[in-house]
Amino acid sequence: MIPFNIKQLETFLWVATLGSFRKAAERLNTTQPAISSRIAGLEEALGVKLFERHSSSVRLTAKGHQLLPAAKRVLRMADKLQMAAHPDAGTGGVLRLGVSETIVQTWLPDFLREFQVDFPLIETDLLVDATTNLRNELISQRIDLAVLMGPVLEFRIENVGMPPVPLVWVCAPQLKLANTSKLTLCQLTQFPIISYGRTTRPYSEIYRKLSSEFDEPPRVFPANSLAASIKMTLDGIGIASLPRDLVGDHVAEGKLLIVDCDWHPSDLLFTASYAMEPTNPVAEHAAELALRTAKAYAVRNDNAVVKSPADGFARLLRDYAGR
C-alpha cells in the first residue's frame, strides 16, 4: 500500500473547493505543478481517480465526491491534534483578515495584540474595505476571516455575532443647534446629512427613511471613509450619523455635540465570518477572540446593550430570512 500524507489531503480539499489547480496553488502558496504532483500521488496511493481534468477547471469524479467527507474528517482531526499539541503557539502561516473601517477605529488594535499572544508564529495580512467587497473576498476564499456588517448568508460561512454598535447624530457647535430638546427629523434635516457610503446598510436605511418622509429628500453626503465623515462633521458641513464610541473623545472635548432626534438609524450589527470548509481552526479561534475583544471594548465604553449581543444578530437573521 502506498502511503499518503496530510499535505496531499489538504491539497485535495482545496482543489475540490476552488475547482482549479491554479487557484489551489495560489491559496497554498505553491506552484501548479506541485499541486498536480500531490493530487497524482494521492490518486496513486488510493488507487482511484479523484478529478476529471478540463482545460480551465477540474471537477470531482463520483469517487472523489464519495471520499471528500472522509478527507474533511481526517483534516479536522489533524488540526485538533496539532492545536492540542501546541495550544499556545499554534502553527506558522498567515491569517488573511478583512475588516470594516468601523472595526479599525474601535477594537481592532486590542484584537491584534491578543491574537499575537495566542498565535505568535502566525502573521496577519490585513485588508480594510467595505462590507460588500469583504463579503466577495470571503466567499472567493481570498481572505480567511471577515469582520463586516453581516451576516454572510452562504451555506459554507459561519457567522459569529458581535455586540451592537450604537449610532448617534452629531454636529459641530458652529451649526448653532441651540435647542437642546429632542429635534424632529424635519428639524434635523434642515442641515445636510453625512452618512456611511452608498453601498452600506446605514446609508440605505437613512435614504429609505428620508425618501418616505419628504417629497424632496434632504441632501445626503455619503462617505466611504469614517475619517472623512468625522472631518466633514468637525468642519460644520452637516449632521452625521456615526458610532457613539468613535466620537466620544470629540464630544468630551466639546468639538462635537450629540443631537437628540426622534429618529436615528439602527445599531450597526457586525459578524466575524469565516468559511467552515475547508476547516480553518485559526480563523475559528480568531472569530471567537474577536467576539471576546468586542465585548470587552463595549463594556469599557459603558455599552448597555452588550448584555445580549445575540438578540440583534438573531433579529437580523430573521429579517433576512423573511425577504
Image: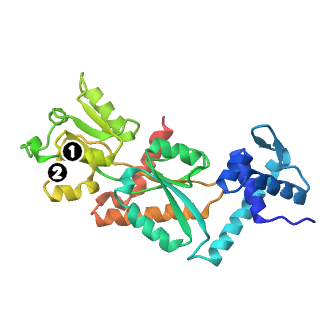
Residue at x 34% of width, y 45% of height: 225
Camera-nearest residue between 8 and 272: 8
Quick check: 294 left or right of 18? Answer: left
- Residue 92: x %, y % from top left: 61, 69
Residue at x 30% of width, y 42% of height: 265
Quick check: 175 left or right of 17? Answer: left
Label 2 sits on what residue type?
Leu
Residue at x 14% of width, y 40% of height: 183
Callout 2 touching callout 1 (CB < 8 Å): yes
Q: How is the image coloured?
A: rainbow
Which quadrant of the structure image shows residue 38?
bottom right
- Residue 21: x %, y % from top left: 74, 48
Camera-nearest residue between 170 and 308: 170
- How many residues crowd around disc 1 within 10 Å: few (fewer than 14), some, or many (20 or more)? many
Res. 11 visible in picture:
yes
Which quadrant of the structure image shows residue 56?
top right
Residue at the far right in the pictured view: 1
- Work out which quarter of the rendered image holds the N terminus and state it: bottom right
Quick check: 293 left or right of 82? Answer: left
Name the mark on residue 256: 2
Quick check: 301 left or right of 112? Answer: left
- Residue 229: x %, y % from top left: 27, 44
Q: Which residue is mark 1?
A: 233
Camera-nearest residue between 278 and 89: 89
Label 1 sits on what residue type?
Thr
- Residue 90: x %, y % from top left: 59, 72
Q: Give me the C-alpha separation between circle 2 and circle 1.
A: 8 Å
Res. 168 visible in picture:
no
Residue at the far left in the pictured view: 178
Determine whether 298 is above or below 199 in the image. below
